[in-house]
C-alpha cells in the first residue's frame, strides 16, 4: 500500500559530518555578538552568576510598571522569576513603540493565500500604531463580554492578523490565551475547552489552505455540541464565540452565543490601558503531545517568557531595525507565539505573516514572498526545506533572494543534505544558518549558534544560549563521555521555562523533573561532539516528530481504539524522506470485522477527525495480534523495526507468540 521509504543516507552522514562554517567577517562585524570569545564570556557569566546576569537583562530588555525585587525563587520544580515585578506583555510589544520612530513602522506585513492575479496574494500592513489600536479595541470587546483577568480564551483562527490581535488583547487585560492550531479537529477543540475551562472561543468562518476552505466555525459548533453532550462544560464556560469574517461563506450564528468580530468593534473605543500584571501572571497555555494519551496544557507566564522570546529573537537572529523577519510557522505552535508575536514585536521588528501553503498556487510561493517584501531573515522547518529540495532548484532560482542575510531552522534535526541545500540554493552561500533547538515547554530557543560568533556544522544546533545549562546524561543522571548518546537534560531553571502543566502539578513533576534528579528532562536523545556541540537525535519517549509536529503515539492509539471495529492498536514511527518520521499503525480488529482497504481509509479519516489532519496515519496495517511480552506490554521496538522494513534484531525470547511476528513482517500474506 505505501511506498517503501528511501534509504536515509543522512543518518550516516550525520555521524561523519566534518564541515565547519565560520561566520563571515562582514557579518560578525555588524553582529550583536561579534566573536566566539565574546559569546563564551557572556555565557560563562550567565551560568556562573545567573542572578546578576538576569537582573541586568530583565531591567534592560523589558518595560516594568513596577520593578521586581527578587530574580528567582526556586522550589524545585516550581520557579518564580522576577518576583514582585509588574508589567504587561502587550505594552512591551506595542505601547513601548508609540512615542518612537517605530510607531509608523510596519509591525505585520500580511499576505493572504488566495492569489488574486494568479500570483500575488492579498496584502494587509499593520504598523505598530495600528496594531496597538486594533489590540486596544478588541481588548475592549473582550471586556464588554465579561472577560476578566485570569479567564482562559481559546483562539482557533487561520493565519490572519486577527490571531495576533486576539493574543495581545488577552495579554493586555490579563486573560490567558490558548491558541489551538487550525489543523486540529472539533474533538481536539472540545478537549482543550474542557481542560482549560475556557470562557470564550475566538474563531473565523473559515480559513484558506491550498485553495480550499477549512471550516473552522463549523468545527467550533461541533466542539461545543460535544462538550454539551458530555456535560463537560462547567457553568460559565464558553458562553461566547467571536467570529472573524475571512472566507465569507455562509455559517450558522447561534443567537446570544456567537458574534461577528467586526460588528463588536462598533461598540467600543480604542482606549484601553494595559493592566499591570504580576511577573508570574499566566500569559498562555499551549497544548502539546506527550507520551500519554492526553495533551498537556503547557503554561507560560509573563515576564520570564517575554524576556526569553525577546532576547533569543534579538541575539539568535541578530535583528536590526531594518530587517524584515519571516517565521513561517503557524501561530498555533509555540514557534509562532515566540517568533511571530512576542519576540519580534518586543524588538520592534517588521514581520511577514503568510496565511497559506508553501506550494500554492505554485511551489515558489515562499520565494515570491521573499522577493516581494525583501525578507532578510527566514525561519522555517527542515520538513519544508526537504519539500522545496524535492520540488527543484528552478523554483528558487527564478527569484531574486538577495535580500536574505540569515536563515533559521527549527522543529526537528536538520539533515546535512538539507542544511547544505538551504545554505547554497536559498542562501546563495552567503547566509549563516542558525539551527535552533527548543520545545513548547522551553518557551524559546535553548541551543543555537549565534550567527556572528559560532562556527556552525551542518546538522547540529551547536551550543547553549545565555543562561542555559544543558547536559547529556545516562540513565543514572551522570554525564556521558563525548560522542556518546544519552538523554538531553537542562541542569538549571531558566526564565522562559514552563511553569507547569495546566491543572496537573503532579504530571508536571513526573514528566519533567523525575526522570533525572534535579534536572529538567527534555525527552530528547543527544550526543555532544569533541567541540561540545549538541547533536539532537530525536525523541526517546513515545512521541513522534512528523513534519515538525509532535504527535504522541498514545493519542493516536486511543483515537484508533475509539473506532467500533478496532480491538487494539499500536503506533510507531518509521523514517520518512520528507516528514522526518511517518506514522505507522498496527491494528487488530474485533471479531467479525473484515480487514479491507476501505476500513484502512476509514481508520485514517477517523484519526483525522479525532485529532486533526496532522495526525492522519501514513500507513495502517492489520494484524491478528500484536507482539507482546509475557507481562502484556506491546513490543514497540519490534514494531518499529518492522515498520521501517528492517530485519528484526534483538531479543525476541520474551515474545508471547512468535508467529505473530512472522505475520506482521509479511502484512500482505
Ligand atoms: C524537536 C518546537 C533537533 C525536538 C520548537 C524537540 C529539534 C521537539 C529542533 C519540540 C532542532 C525542535 N534540532 N530537534 N533544531 N527543534 N526539535 O514542542 O525533538 O513542537 O523536543 O517545539 O522538536 O517540538 P515542539
Image (cartoon, grey):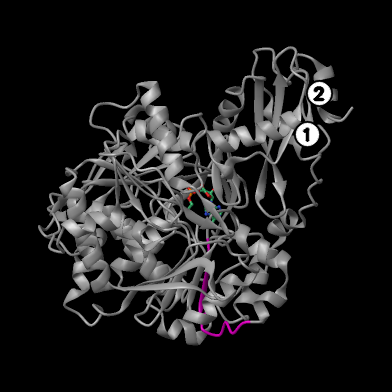
Q: Main secondary structure of the magenta part?
A: loop
- Between residue 372 and residue 334, name the one nearer to us: 372
Q: Quadrant of residue 502?
A: top left
Q: Measured from the top left, where is residue 627 in percent x and y?
A: 74, 21
Is residue 38 highlighted in magenta? no
Residue 332 visible in image: yes
Of the numbered discs 1 and 2, the one sitting upstream in the chain is 1
Instruction: Return the residue at label 2.
Output: 661
Is residue 400 highlighted in magenta? yes
Q: In the image, is residue 268 above or below residue 22?
A: above
- Between residue 436 and residue 231, name the one nearer to us: 231
The 10 Å Cα crowd at callout 1, few under 14, some 14 to 19, many 20 or more, is many
Residue 51 visible in image: no
Q: Residue at x 71, y 49 (%)?
A: 576
Q: Which mark is residue 642?
A: 1
Question: The magenta stretch spans which residues?
Answer: 399-409
Q: Measured from the top left, where is residue 48 in percent x and y?
A: 32, 57
Q: Residue at x 35, y 27 (%)?
A: 506
Whole-angstrom CA distance, mark 1 to mark 2, is 9 Å
Q: Measured from the top left, where is residue 577 in percent x and y?
A: 72, 54
Q: Measured from the top left, where is residue 58 in percent x and y?
A: 23, 61
- Between residue 362 and residue 277, name the one nearer to us: 362
Q: Residue at x 44, y 77 (%)?
A: 35
- Residue lying at the far right of the rendered structure: 669
Q: In the image, is residue 30 above or below residue 16?
A: below
Q: Residue at x 47, y 49 (%)?
A: 182
Amino acid at each position: 500500500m505505501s511506498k517503501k521509504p528511501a534509504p536515509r543516507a543522512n543518518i550516516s552522514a550525520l555521524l561523519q559530518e566534518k564541515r565547519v562554517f565560520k561566520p563571515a567577517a562582514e557579518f560578525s562585524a555588524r553582529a550583536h555578538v561579534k566573536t566566539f570569545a565574546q559569546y563564551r564570556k557572556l555565557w560563562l557569566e550567565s551560568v556562573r552568576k545567573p542572578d546578576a546576569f538576569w537582573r541586568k537583562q530583565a531591567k534592560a530588555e523589558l518595560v516594568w510598571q513596577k520593578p521586581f525585587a527578587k530574580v528567582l525563587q526556586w522550589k524545585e520544580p516550581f520557579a518564580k522569576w522576577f518576583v514582585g515585578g509588574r508589567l504587561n506583555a502587550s505594552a512591551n510589544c506595542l505601547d513601548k513603540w508609540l512615542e518612537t520612530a517605530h510607531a509608523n513602522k510596519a509591525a505585520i506585513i500580511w499576505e493572504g493565500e488566495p492569489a488574486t492575479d494568479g500570483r500575488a496574494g492579498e496584502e494587509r500592513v499593520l504598523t505598530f500604531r495600528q496594531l496597538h489600536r486594533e489590540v486596544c479595541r478588541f481588548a475592549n470587546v473582550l471586556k464588554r463580554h465579561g472577560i476578566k483577568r485570569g479567564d482562559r480564551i481559546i483562539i482557533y483562527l487561520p493565519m490572519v492578523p486577527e490571531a495576533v490581535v486576539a493574543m495581545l488583547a488577552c495579554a493586555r487585560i490579563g486573560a490567558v490565551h490558548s491558541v489551538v492550531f487550525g489543523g486540529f479537529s472539533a474533538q481536539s477543540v472540545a478537549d482543550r475547552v474542557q481542560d482549560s475551562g475556557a470562557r470564550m472561543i475566538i474563531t473565523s468562518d473559515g480559513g484558506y489552505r491550498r485553495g480550499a476552505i477549512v471550516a473552522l466555525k463549523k468545527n467550533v459548533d461541533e466542539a461545543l455540541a460535544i462538550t454539551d453532550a458530555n456535560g463537560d462544560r462547567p457553568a460559565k464556560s464558553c458562553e461566547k464565540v467571536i467570529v472573524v469574517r475571512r472566507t465569507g461563506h455562509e455559517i450558522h450564528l447561534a443567537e446570544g452565543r456567537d458574534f461577528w468580530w467586526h460588528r463588536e468593534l462598533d461598540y467600543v473605543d480604542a482606549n484601553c490601558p494595559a493592566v499591570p500584571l504580576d511577573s508570574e501572571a499566566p500569559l498562555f497555555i499551549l497544548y502539546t503531545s506527550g507520551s500519554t494519551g492526553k495533551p498537556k496544557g503547557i503554561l507560560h507566564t509573563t515576564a520570564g517568557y517575554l524576556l526569553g522570546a525577546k532576547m533569543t529573537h534579538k541575539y539568535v537572529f541578530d535583528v536590526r531595525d531594518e530587517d524584515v523577519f519571516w517565521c513561517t510557522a503557524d501561530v498555533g505552535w509555540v514557534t509562532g507565539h515566540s517568533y511571530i508575536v512576542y519576540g519580534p514585536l518586543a524588538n520592534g521588528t517588521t514581520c511577514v505573516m503568510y496565511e497559506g501553503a508553501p506550494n500554492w498556487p505554485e511551489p515558489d510561493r515562499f520565494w515570491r514572498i521573499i522577493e516581494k517584501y525583501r525578507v532578510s531573515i527566514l525561519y522555517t522547518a527542515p520538513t519544508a526545506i526537504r519539500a522545496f529540495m524535492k520540488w527543484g532548484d528552478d523554483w528558487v532560482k527564478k527569484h531574486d533572494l538577495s535580500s536574505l542575510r540569515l536563515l533559521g531552522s527549527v522543529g526537528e534535526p536538520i539533515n546535512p543534505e538539507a542544511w547544505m541545500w538551504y545554505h547554497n540554493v536559498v542562501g546563495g552561500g552567503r547566509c549563516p544558518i542558525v539551527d535552533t533547538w527548543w520545545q513548547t515547554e522551553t518557551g524559546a530557543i535553548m541551543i543555537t549558534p549565534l550567527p556572528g560568533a559560532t562556527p556552525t556544522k551542518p546538522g547540529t544546533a551547536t551550543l547553549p544560549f545565555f543562561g542555559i545549562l544543558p547536559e547529556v546524561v545516562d540513565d543514572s543522571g551522570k554525564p556521558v563521555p563525548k560522542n556518546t548518546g544519552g538523554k538531553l537534560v537542562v541542569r538549571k531553571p531558566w526564565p522562559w521555562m514552563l511553569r507547569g502543566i495546566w491543572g496537573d502539578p503532579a504530571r508536571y513533576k513526573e514528566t519533567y523533573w523525575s526522570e533525572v534528579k534535579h534536572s529538567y528532562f527534555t525527552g530528547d536523545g543527544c550526543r555532544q561532539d569533541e567541540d561540545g556541540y549538541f547533536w539532537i537525535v530525536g525523541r526517546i519517549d513515545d512521541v513522534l516528530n512528523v513534519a515538525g509536529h509532535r504527535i504522541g503515539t498514545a493519542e493516536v492509539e486511543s483515537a484508533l481504539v475509539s473506532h467500533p471495529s478496532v480491538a487494539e492498536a499500536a503506533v510507531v514511527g518509521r523514517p520518512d524522506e520528507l516528514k522526518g518520521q511517518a506514522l505507522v499503525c498496527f491494528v487488530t480488529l474485533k471479531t467479525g470485522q473484515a480487514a479491507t482497504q476501505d476500513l484502512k481509509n476509514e481508520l485514517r479519516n477517523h484519526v483525522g477527525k479525532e485529532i486533526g489532519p496532522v495526525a492522519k496515519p501514513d500507513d495502517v496495517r492489520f494484524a491478528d495480534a500484536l507482539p507482546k511480552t509475557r507481562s502484556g506490554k506491546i513490543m514497540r521496538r519490534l514494531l518499529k523495526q518492522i515498520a521501517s522494513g528492517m530485519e528484526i534484531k534483538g531479543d525476541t525470547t520474551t515474545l508471547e507468540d512468535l508467529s505473530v511476528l512472522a505475520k506482521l513482517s509479511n502484512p500482505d500474506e
